[in-house]
Image: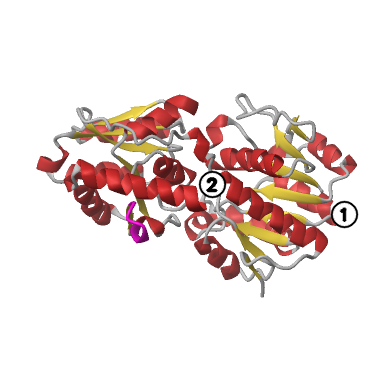
Amino acid sequence: MKINHVITSIDITTGGPARSVTHLIAAMLDVDKSLHIGLDTLKSKNPITRSFNTVNSGIRFHDAETLQRSKSLVNSLNYSETTLLHGHGLWQMPVHQMAKIARQKSVPYIITPRGMLEPWALSQGKIKKQVALKLFQYKDLEQASCLHATAPMEVKSIRALGLKNPVAMIPNGINVNQFPVEIPVKATQPKRMLFLSRIHVKKGIENLIEAWQLADKQLKQDWVIDIYGNGEPEYIKSLKAKIKAANLEHQITIKPPVFDDQKTKVFREASVFVLPTFSENFGIVVAEALASYTPVITTKGAPWEELNTTNCGQWIDIGVAPLVEALNSMMAKSPVDLQQMGVNGRQLIEQKYSMQAVAKQMLALYDWILNKTNKPKFIDTI
């Protein structure tokens, strides 16, 4: 089996998809030693990795021309002997080029939208996306052998567009072993509320700032909010101005992004993780927080109902008022109760979202497409 993955960028600044794709490939190579996987992506300053350190894999970094078109990528895919192509993301030339070549060569292909078909995402730059859908994007999706969703709500978004392809619902996974198994000692002076993600308007940071203003003064006197991430400088500047105008500079701090061991340390020190997002196809940072024994507050813009059903956090409506209620509720809990929620979250990740389990599902999907084996239960067909 020879698989080629295509993603526009695996730069460390691009957020969850770059981590999800590279970690998934590494896990699949570990599960099946006979597997051959190539990754094609555009050149960037700080890629997450430059090699998977196996003889059966390779990463090819390509130059980009106008509108992210890449002649180098086209040549690489044209001369590749791959048996299956797998593209990640929409509205981007590299994945469109992949789909076009796949059809020309009669090679089956999969597209993972990565949340880009969610209602909120479609509403951003709406006219451009409508044009792109008509010109190429809908055809690329419609003629894929299978579409890959990471949560049930994303399956619904795909079907809402009228797409009738098979849809595989396979969650993102994380390398649980990168997160220590020992229960951490949480910071207490002060207690820390953590936001760690790309700093972008869709993440709902303005709602978090406003909700913190309205949160119970008595409860929040022992807490601070740490916001870690990168984003557009002007947007970060506007958030800092909002914090200053609310006289919250001593309680809310925006900090540079952290990676690797330092990121794990920050996750484990926090008493609560909060992601007040408008839209996520998965939210890998939620899984990372839970793996760190940290309870999570996130919105119904992310597919994490299990926060409620397994008592490891709160899954709330989008908006300021529900966030105020959730913040007050979590801050009112005892350290013992928060620790038990953290343990519940760690157990959820170990049982359902480990990278090994996800890799095996993806390999089963590939086998079904290529070898017409029995259809796995996680594939929805019409």
- Please give the name of the residue rendered at 71% of the width and 36% of the height, measured from the top-left corner: 41
**Where is 312 relative to 305, above or below?**
above
User: Could you say where residue 77 lies in the image, as x and y percent from the top left?
Assistant: 83, 42
In screen coordinates, is 194 left or right of 159? left
Residue 354 has which mark?
2
Give the residues drawn in magenta, as a range: 308-312
* Quadrant holding the C terminus: bottom right
Q: Nearer the viewer, residue 264 or 211?
A: 264
SS for callout 1: helix
Left/right of residue 44 with respect to residue 348 in the rendered view: right
Which one is in front, 204 or 17? 17
Q: Is residue 259 visible?
A: no
3D distance between C-alphas at marks 2 and 1: 36 Å
Q: Secondary structure at mark 2?
A: loop
- The x, y position of residue 4, in whole percent, is 77, 44
Q: Amino acid at mark 1?
A: Gln
Name which quarter of the figure residue 39 lies in.
Answer: top right
Marked residue nearer the N-terminal end (2 or 1) = 1
The percent position of residue 319, horizontal first and vertical second, equals 30, 55
**Magenta residue check for 89:** no
Identify which amino acid the numbered label 2 is placed on. Answer: Ser
Tell me if 269 is positioned left or right of 3 in this view. Answer: left
Rendered location of residue 182, percent (x, y): 38, 34
Q: Are marks 2 and 1 in contact (CB under 8 Å)?
A: no
Placement of 152 over or under 129, stated as above or below = below
The residue drawn where x is 41% and y is 45% is: 346
State the residue at coordinates (62%, 28%).
Answer: 47
160 horizontally vs 67: left or right: left
Q: Which residue is mark 1?
A: 104
